[in-house]
Image (tube, grey):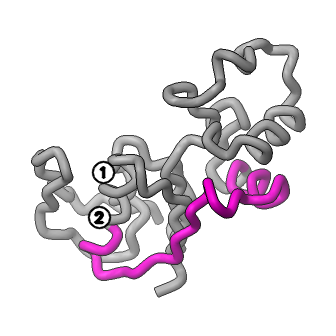
Amino acid sequence: MSEITIYHNPACGTSRNVLGLIRHAGFEPRIVEYLKTPPTKEELRQLLAEMGIGVRDLLREKGTPYAELGLSDPKWTDEELLDFIQQLPILMNRPVVRTPLGTKLCRPSDEVLELLPVGKLEPFVREDGETVIDHGKRRG
């Protein structure tokens, strides 16, 4: 099913767990490995608009050059921050998931449940052994 897209980093445990939850729900999403194929600035603008968040809310600090680049400084405009994400896609927090029910940065991984267009799922065991219980709450 290509109605679901995940902007995915296979090296990220949260991203792998979100992908696992999507598959657990019976969907095979379109996977965009954004480090290999970064979204364009226009695609980023669209994702941000769909999520209702600002560029700074999409920036990832941990494991990135965020601090070295001084990106917490308010001098950087949204356009400049989008340029940084384009040049260094590791700065984009992940995973971002788009479904017919909406678009969201899914951290922690169980945040994806509200976007899945299905009924309540059976429990899912994450990589760390923790069980995710679906309470059946969906957007819509």
Q: Position of residue 50 (x, y in %)?
A: 67, 56
Q: Position of residue 101 (x, y in %)?
A: 50, 68
The residue at 74%/15% (across/down) is: 70
Residue position for label 2: 21
Residue 45 forms part of the magenta stretch: yes
Magenta-drawn segment: 22-48
Taking the image as shown, residue 58 lies to the left or right of residue 119, namely right
Q: Residue at x 24, y 72 (%)?
A: 24
The secondary element bearing badge 2 is classed as helix
Q: Does the stretch in magenta take in 19? A: no
Q: Amino acid at mark 2?
A: Leu
How many numbered marks, from 0 up? Answer: 2
- Mark 1 lies on residue: 110
- Please report contact status of discs 1 and 2: CB closer than 8 Å, yes or no: yes
Q: Position of residue 129 (x, y in %)?
A: 10, 48
114 and 124: which is toward the camera: 124
Q: Element at badge 1?
A: helix
Label 1, label 2: how far apart the Cα atoms are: 8 Å
| Displayed quadrant of residue 57 | top right
